[in-house]
Image: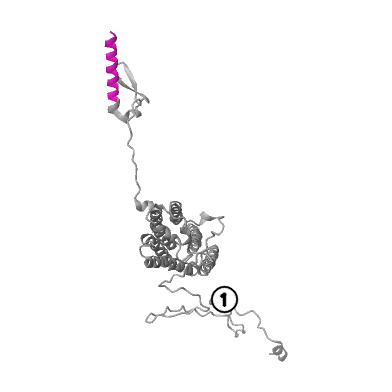
Amino acid sequence: MCTTACRRAGERILDGTRRSLSVGVEGAGGPAGGERPVSPGWKMPASSVAAPLPLRFSVPSARAAASRLTTMHFGAASLVILVGGILLSILTTTEPLWWQLHFSELGTYRNTSGGFFNGTLIIAGIAVTLYARSVGRDLRRIRRVYVRRGAPLVAQVCLSIVGVNLSLVGCIPLNVNKTLHDNVAGSMVLGFAALLLTSPILLHRMPKRLVFTTSIVFVVIFIGAWLFVTETINLALFEVIATSAMFAWSGIFTRSLTARVQAVSSPGALVGTPGATPVPRRHRAVRSHRRALRPTSRPQVRSLTGVPRRPQPVRPAVLRAAHAPLPRGRTGSAARGASGQWTTPARRSRRSRAVGR
């Protein structure tokens, strides 16, 4: 008896499970709100078996992911990569007196330190090139509002020169070809110097702190170069001074550019932010094929050739009553032919009365 009862209970459970799996998720919306008959004499909750729902994961493309990155992201990534890689190269070097020469000495060793240094320069150069592309894109957004027309192209070209030559410095170590290495490093410095020289002209409506920072960077680099020429400092320290000044200017420039882009895209987003007040845009006059109507002092009437003028209406003559006395025997009434004799005495002047006429 016990075996038969257990077998029947097992068959009922299997039958209910089979029916629940057949209906799937549709059983969750039953008409009675909860139970569905499975077999005679036994009921099973409709939501007791849950069907797994498919999960969809969307992987964004590389172009979509790159479009979400801002100029600040690319600038920060370049700084972190360059500083972090050089620090790793310094910590793993086997030559403790490298600082007496210059930073390029770290890339001459065929060990982990040299690999870190050269690889860092290559990756940082690529990041700077992407940063240049993002800067050009942002400058095109605020063109003719805060910068001049050629500012996007000039800034992108100068920063691209810096990025490409930085990667070439890592690809051509000092011990491989010293002349080519020095020329590439000099081209990188010239690209950044060209950007500094043209920024006050091309970025003439940027915040004043950018102009102030540009002046300070010029002074710092000039003082560092003078100390290096007089052999007060070595080349490694001069490279530290120049690189620090370059990244300081780039940080101020990136922050100012981001603020201007946000001011153009959403003017109400920067209310209350110091130094981020948008400059009102000057509206240029749009030339039209129609001439503007200008009011004249006197209206001029011009008649078209071959078109007859409208005839002027002729007013009828108004008959006015005579004030002189009527001759004897004539009537002066307003009625036609039905008036009597003139009864109003004629008015005579004093002279006529005196004469007796």
Q: Quadrant of the N terminus?
A: top left
The residue where tag 1 is placed is: 334
Relative to 121, 15 lies left or right: left
Q: Is residue 226 left or right of residue 28?
A: right
Q: Position of residue 254 (x, y in %)?
A: 48, 59
| Magenta segment, prevailing SS (helix, strand or loop) | helix
- Residue 170 on image: x %, y %: 38, 59
Quick one: 172 or 31, which is closer to the camera?
172
Residue pictured at 43% horizontal, 79% vertical: 311
Query: Is residue 233 visible to us here?
Result: yes
Residue ranking furthest to the top: 1
Residue extending farthest right: 354
At horizontal 38% and vertical 51% (from top left) the residue drawn is 65
SS under mark 1: loop
Q: Amino acid at mark 1?
A: Ala
**Residue 10 colored in magenta in the image:** yes
Q: Is residue 142 above or below residue 59?
A: below
Q: Is residue 45 magenta?
A: no
The way the protein has been coloured in the rendering is one colour
Q: Residue at x 30, y 29 (%)?
A: 24
**x and y, in percent, of residue 171 in the image:** 36, 60
> Which portion, as a residue range, is magenta?
1-19
Tell me if residue 328 comes above or below residue 150 in the rendering: below
Question: Dot 1, crowdedness within 10 Å: few (<14), some or many (≥20)?
Answer: few
Pinpoint residue 245: horizontal percent, then vertical percent: 51, 62
